[in-house]
Image: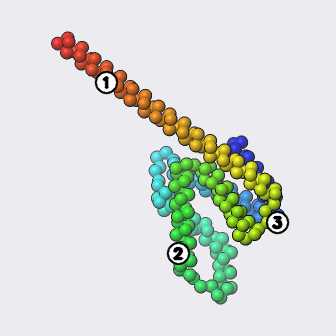
Amino acid sequence: MSNMLSISFGVAIAAYGEARFNSFGVLLQLGAVVFEATRLVLIQILLNSKGISLNPITSLYYVAPCCLVFLSVPWIIVEVPRLRDGSSFRFDYLIFGTNSLCAFGLNLGVFLLVGKTSALTMNVAGVVKDWLLIAFSWSVIKDTVTAINLFGYLIAFLGVAYYNHAKLQALKAKEAEKKAGQLGGDECGKLLEEKDEKSSRKMDNDK
């Protein structure tokens, strides 16, 4: 919890130091983060629930129609009037097709990552994605980045680095425990075999 709070604190500082801070935009972004986190947690429950074994492709088969229904509502409200008013709109099959393939690959990757790790790991990985977007806007688009922004990013970076370190240590400990269990099982098997051999020899001697 303290690790997640430190990452959130760093991101909050970076948001506060934004050169063109907009309260409404921050509220929209916070709402998007909450909905995304909820979606990832539900995906993890869907993939890892007891009695339910769904692979990423099967999960996408069930989730995609729901996404289509919910995304159709803002599309009808926001996009359709603009498309209706703009007479220059032309459906480009190449652009829409490649975008669809990218979206399919993205969702498949999300399901794989959440299924193998957890929704929390996916959210932490989202922080790294935000860094890449900020670095791109800073270097290519020449967007303004303040010293407070960089300080907040540094705190978030340290939090993410510690989280990855803790996950790696936990994975190593789990593997070591598994190996120790296997060695213990082998030793028990050898003891049982020796016991069986001794019993067989005793029966032969009795005969």
SS at circle 2? helix
**Amino acid marked by disc 2:** Gly
Q: Which mark is residue 97?
A: 2
Q: Is residue 202 above or below residue 84?
A: above
Q: CA distance from mark 1 to mark 3?
A: 74 Å
First along the sequence among labels 1 and 2: 2
Residue 49 left/right relative to 163: left
Locate residue 135: give its quadrant. Answer: bottom right
Q: Is residue 16 above or below residue 73?
A: above
**Amino acid marked by disc 1:** Glu
* Picture coordinates of residue 126, whole percent (x, y): 64, 56
Q: Which mark is residue 20?
A: 3
> Is residue 2 among the parts visible in the rendering?
yes
* Picture coordinates of residue 99, whole percent (x, y): 56, 72
**Amino acid marked by disc 3:** Arg
Locate residue 149: give its quadrant. Answer: bottom right
SS at circle 3? loop
The residue pinned by badge 1 equals 193
Residue drawn 82% across and 64% down?
19
